[in-house]
Amino acid sequence: MRNNNALSIFDEMDNFFDDFFKPAKYDMKSDIRQVENGYEIDVEIPGFNKDEINVDYNDGYLTVSANHKENHDEKKHGKLIHQERSYSTLSRSYYVGNIDKTKVNAKMNNGILTISVPKAALEAPKGKTIMIE
């Protein structure tokens, strides 16, 4: 049986163009820095407005989630004939341990969400008198 190389080249070209025009999977890339009193986390979330982003803390995990709301209002925006932008929910969690939840803050600037996460103050060990039996 003879292998038709010309056909396989065309198949590979078709696969290349299919993959090229397929929307890329988006991950929330981040940088984490340890600073004097805690951590700073920079999360890349381009194309999202701050009202589409949530930051939650639960059981030692800080979770960042983002959700685009799809708009199908044809009267206002026109009929959609081709779509490559995705309207999905993204989420990523970071283990930060015991933190001071009251002092966590976040700000959005040019598609980068910066979260300041202060560590919880550790209580100094209290003295204890040992009884002698």
Image: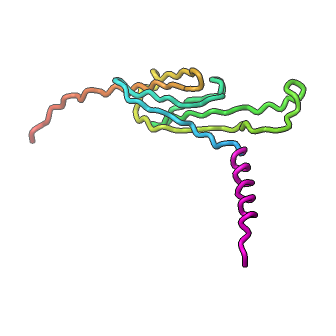
Nearest to the observer: residue 7 or residue 82: 7
6 in magenta: yes
Vertical arrangement, residue 77 with respect to residue 86, above or below = above
In the image, residue 21 above or below residue 46: below
Residues 107 and 100: in front is 107
* Magenta residue check for 107: no
Residue 60 coordinates in the image, percent (x, y): 45, 36
**Image coordinates for residue 64, horizontal then vertical, percent:** 56, 33
Quarter holding residue 11: bottom right
Task: Locate the N terminus and report the quarter of the image it occupies.
Answer: bottom right
Residue 59 in view (yes/no): no
- For image coordinates 56% across by 36% down, the residue present is 28
Percent across and percent down for residue 43 are 53, 31
Compared with 50, 24 (above or below) is below
Residue 10 seen from this side: yes
Q: In this image, 115 relative to 128: left or right? A: right
Magenta stretch bounds:
1-21
Magenta-drawn stretch, dominant element (helix, strand or loop) = helix
| 2 or 61: nearer the viewer | 2
Q: Is residue 17 left or right of residue 110?
A: right
- Which one is nearer the viewer's eye here, 62 or 107? 107
Q: In the image, residue 75 lies at what x, y percent?
A: 90, 26
- Number of numbered discs: 0
Quadrant of the image containing the C terminus: top left
Instruction: Farthest residue to the bottom: give it.
Output: 1
Residue farthest right in this picture: 75
Residue drawn 44% across and 32% down? Answer: 32
